Amino acid sequence: MVFSSGIAAISVPVLSLLQQGDHAVVVENPYSWTIKLFNNFLPKFGIDTTFVDGSEIENIENAITPNTRLIYLESPNTFSYELQDLQAIAKIAKEKGILTMIDNSYCGPLYQQPIKLGIDLVAQSATKYIGGHSDVVAGVLTGSKELIKRIFDHEFMNIGPTLSPHSAWLLIRGLRTLPLRMQRSYETAKSVTEWLSKHPAVDKVIWPFSPTFKQAELAHKQMQGCGGMFSFTLKDPSVQKIEAFCDKLRHILMAVSWGGHESLIIPSIAGIALSDYDKNNSRHQLIRMYVGLEDADYLIRDLEQALAG
């Protein structure tokens, strides 16, 4: 089922699956508007949420209550790349009669197939890799015929997040080159992360297929490939140093989103008030970079001159 945005592909099924008195278990640090959906919107309808660190199965199990109807995942998430063991969580959920849903936008449909691992519903932002050209906003939801029909016949038709014909055509165009673009982005990200990890000004690089990634074994187990987005931190994580680095970039654009042809970068501090910045908070230090279709050497030269001095 296709939607007019990625957040619509998340919100509509969640509204379909939950009702007053229900409870959801949601992993920490998902997409910002997903947080707002569960934190601000659903409580108006008497729906409770518990956020947990999903990297440990026990945290999810311990958060389940008699009223839990949904376990919502995002693996990897799209700033610090924490993973959840999808197969293990799906097994627990099925034993307890709880539905599972995941935001699969980071890997897209080629590099991770959560339904094969037992997840019930898979949402993804088609604005990203599927569209692939930064010129369409759309979302996709996949699942069993029974669940999709239930969502389509009620919440989808009442809320009306229908994709326009032109946007649908743009998605079809994007699908034709999806395997080529994903492979190119992956290979370039591998080269760039390897270079960054050796740079004296860089403290650490976080990418699910990096050999130093703390959940690398799980990443290779449930992902067929890796997206071209990663984060890194500087040895000097001050606001001034992060701002100076980003300002010196000549070719890599500072912007949100990912999945298009151009490389993008965005520091966490772009969404944090200076008064709230905590240099000891590792998430505040993160600089997220998406690798597009440019040559690795072209990107490395830009990063090198921005990191100098």
Image (tube, rainbow, N blue to C red):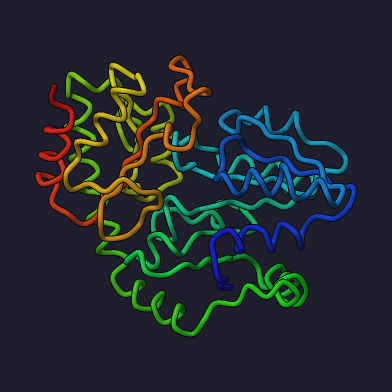
In this picture, residue 202 sits left or right of residue 153? left
Q: Nearer the viewer, residue 162 or 242?
A: 242
Image-based side of 47 in relation to 273, left or right = right
Depth check, front residue: 134 or 76: 134
Query: x, y percentage for residue 254?
Result: 31, 45
Q: Residue at x 75, y 59 (%)?
A: 15
- 138 vs 218: above or below: below
Left or right, residue 113 beside residue 244? right
Q: Residue at x 45, y 53 (%)?
A: 112
x then y, percent, for residue 127: 44, 63
Q: Could you tell me residue 230's position as x and y percent?
A: 34, 39
Q: In the figure, residue 250 lies in which quadrant?
A: top left
Which sits in the foreground, 280 or 83? 280
What is the number of callouts on the image? Answer: 0
Residue extending furthest toward the bottom: 165
- Image quarter in which the N terminus is found: bottom right
Quadrant of the image for the C terminus? Answer: top left
> Which residue is at 50% across, 68% downward?
138
Question: Is 99 drawn above or below residue 130 in the view shown?
Answer: above
Coordinates of residue 256 in the picture (x, y in percent): 40, 49
Viewer-proximal residue among 111 and 126: 126
Up-down relation of residue 109 to residue 231 (above or below):
below
